[in-house]
Image (cartoon, grey):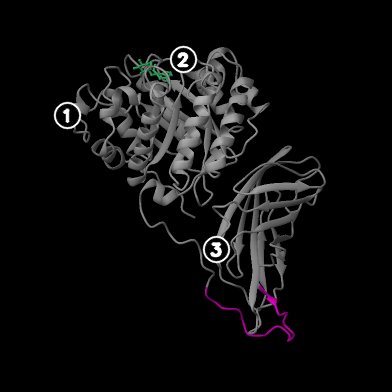
């Protein structure tokens, strides 16, 4: 919040890593006979490093409400480029850049603002742009009448002392009510305020085997007793899964998305490929499935799409090719949803097959608003995997859509030391995670004791395994999602 300085002069702050730059612009105040007013204020901040940067741009409409908008600015240095943008359609021609609103952020009321951003590159220097336009009007920080033009000199009365309106506070306290539609910004998962957040939650087991574990009572327990943010819906494709009954499994996934939404939980739709490891084997099924679920759930703001669980025995270029065919199917229906792409070697960023994340950094999927999957099993995957995650996390948006506290078989004893080291690392890096599994399977990774789902009580600790107890304690700690 800021107060408007006197006299009739408004300041627009443009901050950057290279130092904050203050622009003072004299804005003509609206004359009493103005028909329609336009006006805007823009803040532009960057995180910059040698050769690259992430820019966060907040656009505030100070004129009459608009239904769609185009932001324009010019880079001061010839070597500055937009590489990958989000929350707008970004284009660059020479040094001129435009960002066109998306369907979900085009409407901006008077005083409303929205945050967009991009990853960029630079060669000589990386100064912040100094002038912005919104729908052709210069963003000088105040409303300007468009018709008719004022013929009298600007009034000398001081500007109003009431502060400009801000985004209203969230109306609920659930993770989705607070954070709203998520998007990838830089290497982070960000909420509707453009702030990095971490989601913590649980993964279902295979829906074909454990359908009786996913119902109103168990999801109430996940939302309220566990205080989770996220429910991963693990829909196996093989092993008596989706391929045997596409309509039935699609409906089951949709109904679980609704149950998550009703409780303010994010729903991660996992197209759980495992064997065969080549995602191309299921390409047609993936297109059919994601066309259906993205059309049906497009209006919701709690859905995240995980397009392939654990590719294995295939090259990164094959996975990338698969992603570049499936993502457009989702985007055609649900353009603003975050999509997560599996990685080589059972989603180990390639490490389990002798590679590393460089292959992704050097050849990223050509789509925006995406993240990359990392999976681990704490008793099997230790320091060399943690080191790679730490290294990759500053270069790629990562999401741990599945991990176990036990060995990669899904069974065995909980490795508390390694699980703690992993979760401390993910917390520090704000990497979201889902634990395998929220089920009563007879294996060490299951959170509930065998028979729990038949019994119908999911709250408290008496129904939990050692892994379940460990995970519930981790997940129940407060989230503290940033709201401004
Ligand atoms: C395991 C289940 C087990 C099931 C097996 C085969 O825990 O009950 O018999 O799958 O379907 C993964 C996979 C996940 C595995 C899990 C544990 O994504 O499907 O679940 N795991 O082995 N990757 C690494 C480990």
Query: Of marks 3 and 2, which one's residue comes earlier in the chain?
Result: 3
Q: Secondary structure at mark 2?
A: loop
Label 3–label 2 contact, CB within 8 A: no
Query: Of marks 3 and 1, which one's residue comes earlier in the chain?
Result: 3
Residue under circle 1? 455
Real-space CA distance between mark 3 and mark 2, rounded to the nearest whole angstrom: 48 Å
Task: Tell me where residue 329 sits by quadrant.
Answer: top right
Query: Of discs 3 and 1, which sits in the foreground?
Result: 1
- Dot 1, crowdedness within 10 Å: few (<14), some or many (≥20)? few
Task: Tell me where residue 314 sits by quadrant.
Answer: top right
Ligand 1 location (quadrant): top left
Q: Is mark 2 within 8 Å of ligand 1?
A: yes
Q: Position of residue 4 (x, y in %)?
A: 59, 72
Residue under circle 3? 112
For the point 43% across and 26% down, the residue is: 402
Q: Can I make out residue 309 in this image?
A: yes
């Amino acid at each position: 919040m800021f107060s408007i300085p006197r006299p009739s002069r408004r300041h627009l702050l443009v901050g950057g890593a290279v130092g904050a730059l203050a622009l003072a612009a004299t804005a003509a105040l609206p004359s009493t006979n103005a028909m329609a007013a336009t006006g805007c204020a823009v803040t532009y901040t960057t995180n910059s490093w040698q050769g690259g940067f992430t820019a966060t741009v907040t656009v505030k409409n100070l004129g009459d409400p608009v239904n769609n908008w185009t932001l324009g600015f010019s880079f001061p240095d010839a070597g500055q480029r937009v590489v990958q943008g989000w929350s707008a359609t970004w284009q660059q021609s020479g040094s001129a850049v435009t960002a066109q609103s998306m369907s979900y952020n085009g409407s901006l009321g008077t005083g409303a603002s929205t945050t967009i951003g991009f990853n960029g590159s630079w060669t000589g220097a990386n100064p912040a742009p100094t002038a912005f336009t919104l729908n052709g009007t210069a963003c000088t920080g105040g409303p300007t009448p468009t018709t008719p033009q004022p013929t009298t000199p600007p009034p000398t009365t001081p500007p109003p002392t009431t502060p400009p309106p801000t985004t209203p506070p969230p109306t609920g306290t659930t993770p989705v009510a607070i954070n709203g539609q998520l998007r990838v910004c830089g290497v982070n998962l960000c909420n509707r305020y453009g702030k990095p957040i971490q989601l913590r939650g649980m993964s279902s087991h295979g829906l074909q085997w454990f359908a009786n574990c996913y119902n109103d009572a168990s999801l109430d327990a996940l939302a309220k007793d566990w205080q989770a943010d996220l429910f991963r819906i693990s829909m196996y494709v093989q092993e008596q899964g989706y391929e045997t009954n596409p309509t039935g499994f699609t409906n089951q996934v949709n109904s679980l998305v609704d149950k998550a939404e009703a409780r303010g939980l994010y729903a991660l739709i996992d197209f759980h490929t495992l064997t065969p490891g080549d995602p191309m084997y299921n390409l047609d099924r993936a297109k059919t499935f994601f066309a259906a679920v993205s059309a049906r759930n497009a209006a919701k703001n709690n859905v995240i799409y995980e397009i392939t669980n654990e590719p294995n025995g295939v090259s990164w270029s094959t996975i990338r090719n698969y992603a570049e065919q499936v993502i457009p199917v989702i985007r055609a229906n649900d353009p603003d949803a975050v999509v997560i792409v599996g990685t080589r070697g059972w989603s180990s960023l390639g490490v389990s097959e002798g590679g590393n994340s460089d292959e992704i950094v050097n050849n990223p999927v050509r789509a925006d608003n995406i993240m990359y999957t990392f999976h681990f099993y704490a008793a099997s995957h230790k320091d060399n995997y943690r080191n790679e995650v730490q290294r990759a996390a500053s270069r790629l948006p990562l999401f741990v859509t599945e991990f176990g506290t036990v060995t990669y078989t899904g069974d065995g004893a909980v490795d508390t030391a390694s699980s703690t080291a992993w979760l401390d690392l993910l917390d520090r890096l704000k990497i979201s995670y889902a634990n395998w599994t929220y089920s009563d399977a007879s294996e060490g990774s299951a959170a509930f004791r065998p028979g729990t789902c038949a019994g119908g009580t999911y709250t408290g600790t008496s129904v939990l395994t050692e892994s379940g107890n460990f995970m519930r304690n981790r997940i129940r700690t407060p989230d503290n999602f940033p709201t401004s």
